[in-house]
């Protein structure tokens, strides 16, 4: 299984991350990635990026050294009823939105409350990826969530950091989620959730888990640039058309 895009990473726009867009770009080229997406924490997260960070990403090139850059955000599922907490005016500047539970914004709650918040967030139609849903601090009804993700065309993220240095105890949940996604005929994204460029494009743990259960590569929408851009086209994201001529070279 070869994964040639990375849709989850944080830059120095957040103080607890340590790499610049240039650092990521250099390693993306070195590692043969086709595309990556910068997804800094939303402004309502402590240490999140300022709103201007998201509005001004247009100054960055779309393609440099034949690697494309996407302009994303990791938004916070809102307490307690769900939603993303982003101003309406921010969406036109974003190619995609990851929606995640984060402890400083959403105090961990019971299964029913968490599940309802996730599903209401998916139903807003404004997020494309559900970030690290295997976090054991947020018990959710996985089957209900995967069904809602499918109904709303939102990818379920399998987060490589959840297997390495974040959200300890995620592993069995992530395996269960992978099995459910396969059984319910849905799709995932793989994200490194890098807070430093050194881990960009690192999906060893995701791939190992996927292989262990025979999870098909065809369900990994972030496996290559054309596949993820086609998905963004389904969400009417202008970047899909903008990058489509460039992405043709990677269509097989
Ligand atoms: Zn972070
Ligand atoms: Zn996160």
Image (spheres, helix red, strand yellow):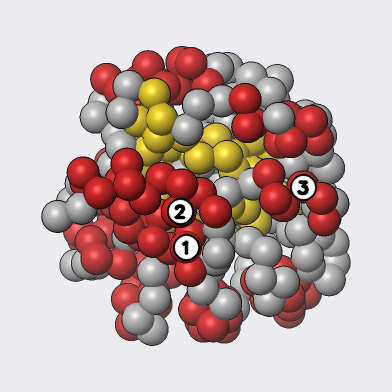
Q: CA distance from mark 3 to mark 2?
A: 18 Å
User: Which is nearer the N-term, disc 3 or disc 2?
Assistant: 3
Q: Callout 2: helix, strand or loop? A: helix
Query: How far from the left and from the top, in percent, is residue 153?
Result: 51, 73
**Badge 3: how crowded within 10 Å, few (<14), some, or many (20+)?**
few
Q: Which residue lies under the disc numbered 3?
A: 90
Q: Is mark 3 within 8 Å of ligand 2?
A: no
Q: What residue is shown at x 50% (from left), y 26% (from top)? A: 61
Q: CA distance from mark 3 to mark 1?
A: 19 Å
Closer to the camera in the image, 237 or 181: 237
Query: How far from the left and from the top, in percent, is residue 19?
Result: 54, 17
Q: Is mark 2 within 8 Å of ligand 2?
A: no
Q: Which residue lies under the disc numbered 2?
A: 240
Q: Is mark 1 within 8 Å of ligand 2?
A: no
Q: Quadrant of residue 56?
A: top right
Q: Is residue 17 left or right of residue 214?
A: right
Q: Callout 3: helix, strand or loop? A: helix
**Badge 1: how crowded within 10 Å, few (<14), some, or many (20+)?**
some
Closer to the camera in the image, 196 or 134: 196
Query: How far from the left and from the top, in percent, is residue 22?
Result: 48, 16
Q: In the picture shown, does residue 26 fall above or below 141?
A: above
Q: What residue is shown at x 77% (from left), y 47% (from top)? A: 90
Q: Is residue 233 left or right of residue 14?
A: left
Q: Which mark is residue 233?
A: 1
- Please say if the residues under marks 1 and 2 sit with CB atoms less than 8 Å apart: yes
Q: Which mark is residue 130?
A: none
Q: Callout 1: helix, strand or loop? A: helix
Disc 3 versus disc 2: nearer the observer: 2
């Amino acid at each position: 299984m070869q994964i040639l895009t990375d849709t989850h990473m944080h830059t120095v726009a957040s103080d607890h991350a340590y790499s610049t867009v240039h650092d990521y770009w250099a390693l993306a080229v070195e590692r043969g990635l086709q595309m990556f997406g910068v997804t800094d924490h939303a402004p309502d997260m402590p240490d999140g990026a300022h709103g201007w960070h998201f509005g001004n990403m247009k100054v960055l090139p779309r393609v440099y050294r034949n690697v494309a850059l996407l302009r994303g955000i990791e938004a916070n599922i809102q307490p307690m009823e769900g939603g993303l907490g982003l101003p309406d005016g921010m969406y036109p500047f974003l190619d995609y939105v990851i929606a995640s539970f984060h402890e400083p914004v959403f105090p961990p709650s019971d299964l029913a409350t968490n599940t309802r918040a996730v599903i209401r967030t998916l139903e807003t139609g404004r997020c494309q990826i559900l970030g690290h849903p295997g976090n054991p601090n947020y018990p959710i009804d996985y089957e209900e969530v995967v069904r809602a993700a499918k109904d709303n065309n939102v990818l379920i993220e399998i987060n490589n950091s959840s297997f390495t240095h974040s959200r300890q105890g995620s592993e069995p949940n992530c395996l269960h989620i992978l099995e459910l996604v396969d059984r319910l005929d849905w799709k995932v994204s793989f994200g490194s959730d890098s807070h430093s460029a050194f881990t960009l494009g690192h999906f060893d743990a995701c791939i190992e888990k996927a292989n262990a259960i025979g999870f098909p590569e065809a369900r990994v929408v972030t496996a290559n640039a054309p596949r993820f851009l086609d998905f963004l086209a389904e969400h009417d994201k202008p970047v899909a058309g903008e990058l489509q001529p460039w992405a043709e070279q990677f269509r097989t």
